[in-house]
């Protein structure tokens, strides 16, 4: 009985440790439990000018807090691109409700790349322009076409929208994509590939079904994944990475 109580106490301490960040995130303006999906904004955040006034090639990765209580834990991410001279942006993302309705979550849409995600304002995580973007676009489209989990979806621990973004980024090293710790699912890799490149392409990670792992890379720094939640330190940006709260520091 004593051993059982000790183990129970340890389990409660671990859960408290893991959930402290998301609990604090619920107290910030980043997370709202009051929005309704049918009235929440999907308008452009005006982070990018119209495609017609941006003649150069563009590649960007965006993210915004997910809808409802899940926003305390995670962001939803997507990839946008525009070839040189094109009159509209194209966005690729994986959406859970599309999977649940049709069995395939991979979506392609045209229009503003910086739309709010059901009321949550997006951030830009990576941005390529000009020749670098033009070179990356065929790589991205090939990676999207070969995405292995389009007909699979799990909110936690993956494969989900962040798994998609991370998987594509691994095949486009020029992005040097450092996804935030709130991109839950980014560490989910093919169960047959425990060792994989980091999403930024500047290091490697060991991941067990996205539930437990370690990542070490120049761009991301050191990250430890426990039950899909990321703790880490980024010496390059002098910042900490915490579940729910994201990146803490000047980086």
Image: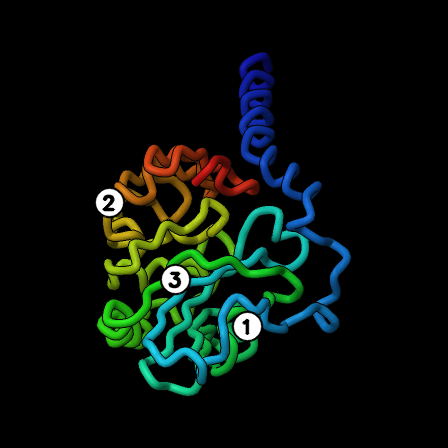
Would residue 169 appear left or right of 113 to someone viewing this image?
left
Would residue 207 appear left or right of 99 to someone viewing this image?
left
Contact check, label 1 and label 3, Cβ < 8 Å: no
Display coloring:
rainbow
In the image, what residue occupies the spot 27% across and 58% down?
170
In the picture, the disc for residue 204 is 2
Q: Which element carries disc 3, helix, strand or loop?
A: helix
Q: Is residue 226 above or below residue 146?
A: above
Mark 1 = which residue? 100
Q: Which element carries disc 1, helix, strand or loop?
A: helix
Residue at the limit of the structure toward the top, as seen here: 2
Q: Tell me the quadrant of the picture where the N terminus can be found.
A: top right
Task: Quote the CA–CA distance across marks 1 and 2.
Answer: 32 Å
Q: Tell me the quadrant of the picture where the C terminus can be found.
A: top left
From the viewer's perspective, is the residue at label 1 or at label 3 nearer? 3
Task: Quote the CA–CA distance across marks 1 and 3.
Answer: 19 Å
> 49 or 149, which is in the foreground?
49
In the picture, the disc for residue 165 is 3
Q: Is residue 35 visible?
A: yes
In the picture, the disc for residue 149 is none
In the image, what residue occupies the spot 32% across and 76% down?
57
Q: Is residue 197 above or below residue 103?
A: above
The image shows residue 139 at horizontal and vertical percentages of 24, 71
Task: Quote the CA–CA distance across marks 2 and 3.
Answer: 16 Å
Q: Is residue 146 visible?
A: no
In the image, what residue occupies the spot 49% across and 79% down?
50
> 21 or 178, which is in the foreground?
178
Q: Earlier in the sequence, mark 1 or mark 3?
A: 1
């Amino acid at each position: 009985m004593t051993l059982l109580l000790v183990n129970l106490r340890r389990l409660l301490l671990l859960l408290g440790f893991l959930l402290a960040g998301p609990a604090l995130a619920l107290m910030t303006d980043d997370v709202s439990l009051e929005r309704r999906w049918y009235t929440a904004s999907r308008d452009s955040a005006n982070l990018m000018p119209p495609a017609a006034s941006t003649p150069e090639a563009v590649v960007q990765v965006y993210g915004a807090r997910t809808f409802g209580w899940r926003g305390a834990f995670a962001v939803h991410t997507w990839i946008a691109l525009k070839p040189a001279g094109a009159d509209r942006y194209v966005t690729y993302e994986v959406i859970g409700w599309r999977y649940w309705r049709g069995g395939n979550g991979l979506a392609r849409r045209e229009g503003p790349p910086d739309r709010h995600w059901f009321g949550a304002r997006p951030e830009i995580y990576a941005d390529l322009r000009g020749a670098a973007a033009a070179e990356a676009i065929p790589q991205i489209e090939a990676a999207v076409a070969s995405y292995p989990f389009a007909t699979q979806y799990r909110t936690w621990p993956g494969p989900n929208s962040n798994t998609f973004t991370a998987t594509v980024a691994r095949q486009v090293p020029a992005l040097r994509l450092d996804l935030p710790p709130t991109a839950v699912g980014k560490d989910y890799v093919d169960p047959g590939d425990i060792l994989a490149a980091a999403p930024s392409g500047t290091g490697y990670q060991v991941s067990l079904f996205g539930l437990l792992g370690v990542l070490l890379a120049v761009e991301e720094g050191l990250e430890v994944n426990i039950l899909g939640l990321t703790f880490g330190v980024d010496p390059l940006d002098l910042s900490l990475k915490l579940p729910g709260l994201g990146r803490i520091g000047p980086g």
